[in-house]
Amino acid sequence: MYEYQDQIGFPILTVMTFLPALAGVLMIAFMRGRPNWYKTTALVTTGANFLLTFVILSAFDHYTADMQFVEKVPWIKSLGISYHMGVDGISVLMILLTTLLSLLIIPASWNYAKDKKELAFFAAFLFLETGMLGLFCARDLFMFYVFWEVMLIPMYFIIGVWGGPRRIYAAIKFFLFTLGGSLLMLVAIVAIAWLARPNPYATPVFDMDLLQNTLFSWNVQFWAFLAFFVAFAVKVPMWPLHTWLPDAHVEAPMAGSVILAGVLLKVGGYGMLRICLPFFPDVISTFVPYIMVLSIIAIIYGALLSLVQKDIKKLVAYSSVSHMGFVTAGIFALNVVGIEGGILVMFSHGLLTGALFLMVGFLSERVHTREITAMGGLASPFPIMAGFLLFFTLASLGLPGLSGFVGEFLSLLGLFTYNKAMGAVAALGIILAAAYLLWMFQRVMFTGLRDEKWRKLPDFSLREIISLAPLGFLAIWAGVYPNTFIDLIHPPVIRLTERLAPYMADGGSTLHNIFASLGGF
Amino acid sequence: MQALGRGLWRGVDQLAIDGFVNNAARFVRGIGNALRPSQSGGVQSYLMTMFLGLLVLTISYWLLTM
Amino acid sequence: MGHDLVAIMPELMLIVTGVVILMVDPLLPPEGRRGLSWLGIFACLTASISTLISSADEFTAFNHGVALDKYSVYFKVLLLGVAIIAMLLSEKHLYLKKRLLGEYYALILFMTVGLIVMAESIDLITFFVGLELMAYCSYLLAGFFRYEERSIEASMKYFITGAFASNFLLFGLAFLYGTTGSTNYQEMGDAIRAGVVPSSVLAMATIMLLVGFGFKVGSAPFHNWAPDVYQGSPTPAAALLSVGPKIASFAVIIKFFNIILGSESDTWVPLMIALSIATMLVGATLAIVQRDLKRMLAYSSIAHVGYLLLAVIASGQSARTMGTSAVLFYLAAYAFMNMGAFGVLVFLENRAGSSDSLDEMAGLGRRFPWAAGIMTVFMLSLAGIPPTAGFLAKFYLLASVVDAGFAWLAVVGVLFSLVSAFYYLRVIVYMYMRDAENEIEVTGEKSWDLSLGLGIAVAGVFLLGILPSPVLTAAQNALEKVLGY
């Protein structure tokens, strides 16, 4: 379906995408040495973007799977490349996550980089926000790639300049891992853009709406799927391409980890939904078994490794690997339940892990360590923090009533319909998650107080609470009334599964009916 | 359970995967260091290299068209 | 006769200006010499304007010696732009090193004439005249700092290896002339297509040509001169030397391998594939182990030549137009980013005394934020990261390779891209993520020329990366007359 829909009358997507970059440039050019100016600018810009998200949501048509707020202008005519933006439910959900997290890190890091190039610090996050938003809005494959790569640069600087002792190793590892996948993707992009030409004299096709409907030969689909999949798998990150993540998280500054875990890890799943599934339907069933196995490995492996981590950030990093296993398992179950579950896990994980990294950051600012063994008994000097940590820990392990449960449950259900044994094994992952998370909480918050000095340190400040509260609020909302979010993504997911109907593991409709009868869909 | 986790971490993540990655980097650097002597600084060796290049091209062409 | 002179009006302007500079130079006091670069720049600007104005006319001159068509317009404008940037970068540097002589600018102008003649030639004789003119000027430019050992050494090496390679080139050209009976590209091509030339001669000639051209562009295994020459030459001269000869040589390579040897692609394509892979390998892996920046840039140039050869290969197969326009666009992008990178090194040498090693880059982000920022742009562009010119050029190049049916080669190229990203990133790491060990004296004065030159380079990198259409279309249209089939 290829219809334009522009409900608002001004190019809201472009404004939202480039506003942060513009602000960043202004900051660098005019606000050197004036912390209040640039910090406020960062806050106002991200705040404005967050509000724009609500503007979009309010004008959003919940009943269509077509792209909305579409903007299309030819860019490089001779190559068939246009500046083409548009969003559907899935993109909007990701945009919500992005703008929210980008906003919250500003007050959270208000004094974080005081002594070290603070202006550049905030500017980097603004440029990063532009990259991420551009990716979620992109409807031209060339633009998609450009924003994909552009995201790398600020993140690389964030880790490399403001990170921990091994930051250079971590930053380069992050960059080269991702670049390796992306370069493979580049070859695939070029191949399909040129192959999609209606005749050899036409310009290549980069329009994602058109490419979705192009029939490629099985061979082309196979290799292209593989290339794209590898690129996305690195970002998810899927086992065994995940080893950049623990290093990146450990060395990144707090805000860097929040955005990394909160948004950057989602772009992989997003890519799979946007490209792997719609463009190459014929070959998906060939890959699904392997992907499922890798997802299960990720779930269990991630959980097992979390169990033995001494550094709390590495623990959360490996738990991310585990959670993202649910995402890929859900998506490639190829049924409505699984895909929606996968997307919800993405959203929920963004909120929860973002919150976890914020708290780890706040905590380590106080106790100056991330070693779990060095911590203990922190509940007594920091009751508020303990409360928040308990909340997000429980949410992370999938407590019903909170967002983690809904996503994991749905994607498990999707996985079950694909293969019952695998579903059972995956469920083990949830049990392991409970184990490592609760154990971590216990060791950090209870047991004996390690250092008496800590008793005197302040508990959470208002600023820190404000950074966390919205995440908690959304976590509850998504857990108690997920329909708001499910309705948002339902039409595009339905359209996806309808296209894939001939290839689906199970009609999906049976489960759909079950849910309809349970009330809620 | 803990032992399993630790074993997997060390064995797979650190040895196998990271090992592969870090060794790939070392491998590339190794090629660079291996090729280094070809850049000796002496013009004579440069001329010789060029001439050898010519020979290799000629010989491989003949071999390919035989 | 008048017709011929009109055809080479831009070249004549440059020659006259060069001669004037030579004559006026001894009469000027040392301070007065600083205006000479602007004389040269003015000449180049006028020449490019005149080229663009008359770009609608397409004809040949000097008895079918040179062709004036969109192809030569593209290269002329590009080469003149390169010359302008080269002169902008040089002035303060020469002054600080107390070698501010008019000859330098005259040499650049004459070299540019040689480059332009090479690019627009359609006859072996004119091509060779241009080649030799360019070559001798470049040897002199490399050795311009004649009180520095390294400069003299660079010049001698360049000269000796150049003469050696020219021999092979001449051999090959002689073979082709002897068997086809003509020195005009088109006629030679027709003769070859007619089967007049025995295949063994053709093969030998092709190989000789590959050696000669391979040397000129710095392709492996004929690349050894490049690191020494770029390192030893005066840095602004190295900027020009790393860009100018490559541009002109590729202009000729495209014509040679498509017009003359167009029907023999089965012969030269496999050989060029081997050369390309070897070149990318040598360039990328040796750049990683370099700690001297000029040498690193030399190997980086070598790697880029490897990519350019891929596009030439593509043009030899089915992607004729796309492959060649990819080469043209890539050369423009490469010109901006490479000259920019060298330009930053010139800046550092002017202000901080030297810029040789990677360690001296440490902490640059703090000491010279703008220079570091610009260098970051050039490094990212060389690595092929959007939204820079380097990315778009690489993208278009890969597209041409894939379109020609060489998807596997594209993957190989992309792999080397990944390897090369490392050493470009490393510069950024040193600039921003490491702190300087000792405080280096900031001396020297600002040079507005240098800043202008760098500004043009950065603007070029961003413009070509974000709004490439004008240049891209120019590159695509350039081939109208050149590749008839």
Image (cartoon, rainbow, N blue to C red):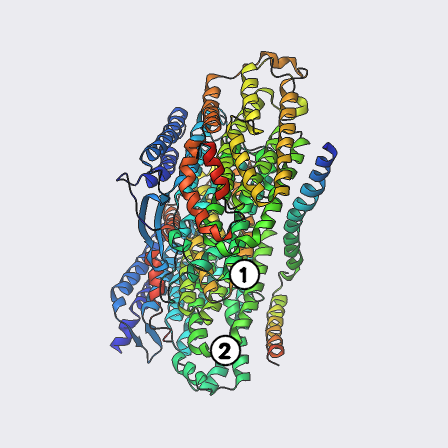
Q: Quadrant of residue A15?
A: top left
- Would you place residue C485 above or below residue C291 in this image? below
Q: Position of residue C105 (x, y in %)?
A: 39, 59
Identify the residue under disc 1: C226
Mark 1 residue crowding within 10 angstroms, few (<14) / some (14–19) / many (20+)? many
Q: Position of residue C473 (x, y in %)?
A: 33, 61
Name the secondary structure under disc 1.
helix
Q: Quadrant of residue A430?
A: top right
The chain letter for the residue carrying disc 2 is: C
Residue occupying image coordinates x 33% and y 62%: C474
User: How far is disc 1 from disc 2 in space, using C-alphas?
Assistant: 21 Å
Mark 2 residue crowding within 10 angstroms, few (<14) / some (14–19) / many (20+)? some
- Would you place residue C269 above or below residue C144 in this image? below
C20 and C231: which one is in front? C231
Q: Amino acid at mark 2?
A: Leu
A112 and A33: which one is in front? A112
- Would you place residue C164 above or below residue A164 in this image? below
The quadrant of the rendering that contains the C terminus of chain A is: top left
Q: Amino acid at mark 1?
A: Ala
Residue B56 visible, this orientation: yes
A485 and C397: which one is in front? A485
Which disc, if any, is residue C170?
2
Badges 1 and 2, same chain: yes
Left or right for C373, reference C157: left
Name the secondary structure under disc 2.
helix
- Would you place residue C167 above or below residue C355 in this image? below
Residue ranking furthest to the front: A517
Residue occupying image coordinates x 40% and y 36%: A488
The chain letter for the residue carrying disc 1 is: C
Residue C100 visible, this orientation: no
Q: How many marks?
A: 2
